[in-house]
Image (tube, helix red, strand yellow):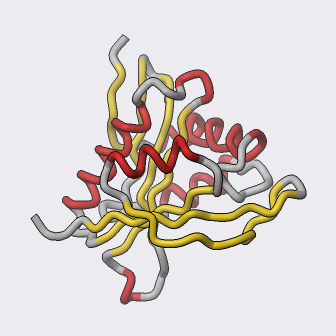
Amino acid sequence: MVRIIRKALPEDIAGITEIYNEAILNTDATFDTQPKTLSEQRKWYKAHGPRNPIMVAEENGVILGWGSLSEWSTRCAYAETAEISLYIRREYRRQGLGKKLMQALINEGKRAGLHTILSRITGGNEVSVKLHRQYGFEHIGTMREVGNKRDKLLDVEMMQLMLGKD
């Protein structure tokens, strides 16, 4: 059983969507509230490119997790800023896949010439905060009660990694 981290391919969209929809329905990790269709996820996939990659953790053709660097804003001044997202299939959480995907995404961000990576983490998600801190992300603020999911107002912790220029 060899687990590999690689750039996502169009044929990975179904696995990515399955993992994301589980998070939508069962966690507060995303503020999406309705499951995504394959059509929606194909559009999302096409909106990513070399500067904003999607990476997957795969084992024997099964997508175990995924992460992405997404455009922070369409405004030109934000061109060197991306937002990171990570999602792991429920039964593979806490096995180090998040760490491997995080490192791969940071490396890709540096290669793409990004200056900074931002992360929005639901308040109380200490596992995610700890993971981000391990890679040098710093807490830059809290947005209070900005999301409402399952009739619960949720905070968002903002974290930032300055990539600099190596």
Q: Nearer the viewer, residue 74 or 27?
A: 27
How many numbered badges does the structure rendering display? 0
Quarter placement of the C terminus: bottom left
**Residue depicted at 66% across the width and 47% down the height:** 38
Q: Relative to 20, is 166 on the left or the right?
A: left
- In depth, the one of 127 and 32 nearer the eye is 127
Quarter that holds the N terminus: top left
Residue at image position (81%, 57%) is 149
Quick check: 52 left or right of 27? Answer: left
Residue lying farthest to the right in this orientation: 151
Q: Is residue 7 above or below residue 60?
A: below
x and y percentages locating residue 159 in the rendered image: 45, 64
In-image side of 110 versus 152 (left or right): left
- Can you tell which quarter of the image residue 101 is in? top left
Q: Quick check: 42 above or below 60?
A: below
Residue pushed farthest top?
Answer: 1
Going 62% across and 37% down the picture, which residue do you hit? 19
Q: Which residue is located at x 66 percent, y 54 percent?
A: 30
Quarter of the figure with residue 164: bottom left
Judge whether 144 appears above or below 65 on screen.
Answer: below
Q: Position of residue 45 (x, y in %)?
A: 50, 55
Please state the horizontal and vertical placement of residue 42, each as a whole percent of the image. Answer: 57, 53
Residue 95, percent from left and from top: 45, 24
Q: Is residue 123 positioned above or below 66 on the image?
A: below
Identify which residue, 108 or 148, lies in the foreground: 148
Asked whether 100 or 19 is in front, the reply is 100
